[in-house]
Amino acid sequence: MGRAPCCDKANVKKGPWSPEEDAQLKDYMEKHGTGGNWIALPHKAGLKRCGKSCRLRWLNYLRPNIKHGEFTDEEDRIICSLFARIGSRWSIIAGQLPGRTDNDIKNHWNTKLKKKLLGFAHKNYFQLPLINTSSFLQTSSISSPILHSQISPPIFELSENPSSSFTAPSLLEAPMHGHNYGYAPVKEGNHNNLLIFGGETSHGKKMEGYYSNGVDHVENHKFLISESHGGEGENGNFISENLLDNYSMEDIKQLISTNHICNNLNFFVDEIKTEDNTLY
DNA sequence: AAATTACGCAACCGCCCATTA
DNA sequence: ATAATGGGCGGTTGCGTAATT
């Protein structure tokens, strides 16, 4: 048996708050406060809302000194630095940014900051550590002809000339699902390339191939990579530009922690102290 | 100009944890 | 000791609007 609902869902209004409801809640809060019980508050305040909904509306929008609008560079820096250290603990991060709510920061991260950060990482991928390599190396039971080493140093070395017939090992596709792909820096002689793996086209074709030094390859097992659009490449093979979905939280934390990126974006703060004096 | 797609944000959902009875 | 309860939190959804086709 599940938990009892916190309110009578059938008789409770949902969706956006009207200005009248806002005024009603604000007025009640200013006169009485929560009284230590959010669940009972809507009834007392004459609102047909769930107590949790009132709490959220108050904390995220109505309470005094809420800051709305653009985040400053300094705020971005703090968010990124903290994310690298503690992950998506938005309420703690919000505690370091006066006037910002956890919801606001979470939205900002998901819609802007993550893209900004990974966009930077993408442009500078040769400096990145390998992404997700441990997972695919563990799942790979064959010795790949293109991978010189089966351990995960920062960069793979190619053991044969990929300009002839380069084929990504099929097992490299295993960790990825749907239309996404993974990638890893590889070293090809003196050149640094990007190995693309994983993904599936709308026709169910597997995607494999590589992207070399910004030059598009469209031949045999090498597919066009577009900077601005995903879509179907040669032979119905799907190429997606959406790198973001390929990162787990740990990947992102690792990215931010990478000295190269931090140095470039100045994503460092010295010390984070919460209200209970916990240091991060 | 209309239709479609992408984006940003407010709000909801459900789980976890601390407190209370 | 433990079941019930409410608060808090992170993940996710869905809607309104902007941008693109």
Image (cartoon, coloured by chain):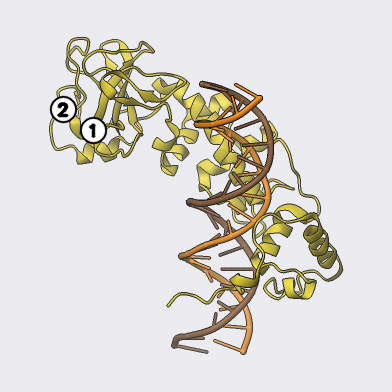
Chain colours: A yellow, B orange, C brown
The answer to whether any part of residue A260 appears in the image is: no
- For label 1, the SS is helix
**Disc 2, disc 1: CB below 8 Å?**
yes
Residue hosting label 1: A172
Q: How many marks?
A: 2
Residue at the image position 19 percent from the left and 34 percent from the top: A171
Mark 1, chain letter? A
- Picture coordinates of residue A164, whole percent (x, y): 18, 10
Q: What distance separates the C-alpha of mark 2 from that of mark 1?
A: 9 Å
- Position of the N terminus of chain A by quadrant: bottom left
- For label 2, the SS is loop
Image quarter of residue A217: top left
Residue at the image position 50 percent from the left and 34 percent from the top: A256
Q: Earlier in the sequence, mark 2 or mark 1?
A: 2
Q: Amino acid at mark 1?
A: Leu
Of A189 and A68, which appears nearest the observer? A68
Mark 2 or mark 1, whichever is nearer to me: 1
Q: Is residue A198 left or right of residue A53?
A: left
The answer to whether any part of residue A108 appears in the image is: yes
- Picture coordinates of residue A251, whole percent (x, y): 41, 38
Q: Amino acid at mark 2?
A: Ser
A157 to A178, vertically: above or below: above
Q: Which mark is residue A144?
A: 2
Residue at the image position 24 percent from the left and 30 percent from the top: A205
Image quarter of residue A134: top left
Image quarter of residue A278: bottom right
Q: Is residue C21 left or right of residue A63?
A: left
- Picture coordinates of residue A17, whole percent (x, y): 72, 56
A266 to A85, vertically: above or below: above
